[in-house]
Amino acid sequence: MFLQQQPEQQQQQQQQHRLEEWRLLQEDMLRQYLATAESDLRAKRELADVKQQRLHLARDEYEHLSATLRQQQQQQQQQQQHLQQHPSNSNISASSTSCE
């Protein structure tokens, strides 16, 4: 009976050893996966930050161009109103430019 216990113990030890190796392998694979996932997440955050900065710059540029356009439109309207209110000045300025 003692001889039968030794092979059973060896089998159990081998099985425990294989389970331990399998567990270590699974832990290692999980660590690798998590490291890769963390790296990917970091890269996606950086990309999102860059896109956010670009969006901010585009909005600033849009606001600047819109303000410039509004200002030019207002100046043109003021010039047209001034010309409508003082038509004789436009004739003088037109004749003075033709003489030059």
Image: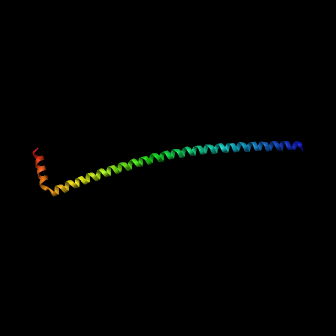
Q: Give the quarter of the figure containing the C terminus.
A: top left
16 relative position to 3: left or right: left
- Residue name at image x 13 percent, y 56 percent: 87
Q: Give the quarter of the figure containing the N terminus.
A: top right
- Residue name at image x 69 percent, y 43 percent: 24
Q: Picture coordinates of residue 34 (x, y %)?
A: 60, 45
- Residue name at image x 35 percent, y 48 percent: 61
17 relative position to 78: left or right: right
Q: Picture coordinates of residue 23 (x, y %)?
A: 70, 45
47 relative position to 24: left or right: left
- Residue name at image x 11 percent, y 51 percent: 92
Residue 82: image quadrant is bottom left
Residue 9: image quadrant is top right
Count up the numbered dots. 0
Please, which colouring scheme is shown? Answer: rainbow
Q: Picture coordinates of residue 46 (x, y %)?
A: 49, 45
